[in-house]
Amino acid sequence: MKQATTEAINRLRDRVHLVIEGTDTPLGKLFDVVLIVAIIASVMVVILDSVASYHQLFGHLFIVAEWVFTILFTIEYAARLFSSPNRLRYATSFFGIVDLLSILPTYLSLFLVGWQYLLVVRILRVLRIFRVLKLMAYMQQAGFLLTALKASRQKIIVFFMSIIMLVTVFGAIMYVIEGPENGFTSIPIGIYWAIVTLTTVGYGDISPLTPVGRAIASLIMITGYSIIAVPTGIFTAELAKKGRPQLHAVSCPKCGKFGHATGANFCDRCGGEMHL
């Protein structure tokens, strides 16, 4: 009896898994399309509910709709957890965490006001559309960008650490020069001003009034224009490097051309046979 029950549960898990993950099956495609429509509709409800006029007119309707979506997504999350071959792996994966975060705010809103607006995280679940439409080319390009970003992460980290040290020094200098009487009431406020100035945002809530302070501000502005494109340049260089074919460090015995595609049997210049 126990073995029959276990077999029945396993068959049910396989069927649920086939529906949820089977993008090649008609029922699986229908499930994913309905799910994406529900995700977009639920995000629109959250966005419209944040508008005061809509909240006054349709507030109760929005609450009902939100609970319907939350219950639907809770059932879907439980089904994914139930049918997953590796439940811990799914629960700790990107989509597993997003799936959980897409239902938690509604339950938390019972105890904490305003948490329901964090449900906009559900928009991340629309990334599943890549699976539905089989846009693997787009996923490959996304992986290409991610690889380039990972390759340049050390340079970017060093750059940002340099920026942090720079704005800390400038913030402390401005605190000493301008002082509380000109709005620089502390070093953190000076650092905030340095960041705003360095990034050329310029809110104008704090500004130097002394000649020395203005001279330093001018220096920071010029520095900001000089270094603001550095992370983009680093990332672009890595992107170009990843886009170039990997060359094997050999010379053609016939024409002497150095550097050929890995695994090439013939020279791409003269056609001579390569001895790899």
Image (spheres, grey):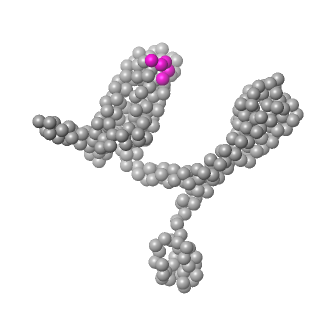
Where is residue 217? Give x, y as percent: 80, 37
In the image, 19 versus 162, the foreground residue is 162
Q: Residue at x 76, y 25 (%)?
A: 185
Q: Is residue 29 visible?
A: no
Where is residue 59? Give x, y as percent: 44, 16
Q: Residue at x 47, y 74 (%)?
A: 264
Above or below residue 68? Residue 87 is below
Q: Residue at x 54, y 59 (%)?
A: 242
Where is residue 269? Give x, y as percent: 54, 78
Quarter of the image with the N terminus is top left
- What residue range appears in magenta? 111-115
Q: Which residue is the extreme one toward the right? A: 211
Q: Is residue 243 visible?
A: yes
Q: Is residue 114 magenta?
A: yes
Q: Residue at x 52, y 65 (%)?
A: 245
* Rendering quarter of residue 90: top left
Q: Main secondary structure of the magenta part?
A: loop
Q: Is residue 51 left or right of residue 131?
A: right
